[in-house]
Amino acid sequence: MDEQLIYRASELVDVTWRPDLSAVYLKWFSEYDEGTGVRDAVMAALTWVRGNRVEHWVVDVSTSSRSLSAADYQWVSSNEFRSFILNSPLRRFVLIPPLPESGQDDSWVADWEANTLANFGDRVSAKVCKSGEEARRFLTA
């Protein structure tokens, strides 16, 4: 089975099903949107996750040129977002962090695993992976 496009917001994100990872894969070109683009993409991904009983979620911000808006950061930190994740079959989360050439502040990456585990409990595992191959090893272990 080939990669399948689930959702696209031009210049913002492609959300795909990656059978090689058994994962929904969110490839962010920019995380910044003044409208509902981030939320729309995440909700499209979660709809796919629920409908297809997907347990793996990969967020790739390696080449993202801009970080989340304050409003979107607040939303992904909210109880509403937490509830969406907890009421899904997701069990493994991967973050592919910003590359140095993206120009993004990556100070938050150091705490991402611990914060993810704190927010979603011991039913999940989370890992920052520097490459797709490292993500594959984690997700298929």
Image (cartoon, grey):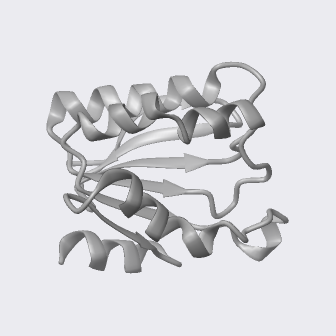
Q: Which residue occupies the foreground of this view, 48 or 86?
A: 86
Dividing the picture into quarters, in which one does residue 104 lie? bottom right
Residue that appears at 24% across and 47% down:
90
User: What is the x, y in percent for residue 23?
Assistant: 29, 52
Q: Is residue 110 left or right of residue 58?
A: right
Q: Which residue occupies the foreground of this view, 36 or 108?
A: 108
Q: Is residue 63 left or right of residue 124?
A: right
User: What is the x, y in percent for residue 26?
Assistant: 48, 46
User: What is the x, y in percent for residue 115?
Assistant: 48, 62
Residue that appears at 53% across and 23% down:
40
Above or below — where is 109 with respect to 24? below
Dividing the picture into quarters, in which one does residue 132 lie? bottom left
Residue that appears at 47% across and 75% down:
129
Q: Is residue 3 left or right of residue 112?
A: left
Can you say which quadrant of the picture contains the C terminus? bottom left
Above or below — where is 141 with respect to 91? below
Q: Is residue 138 left or right of residue 27?
A: left
User: What is the x, y in percent for residue 86?
Assistant: 27, 40
Seen from this angle, which residue lies furthest top?
A: 35
Dividing the picture into quarters, in which one does residue 134 lie? bottom left
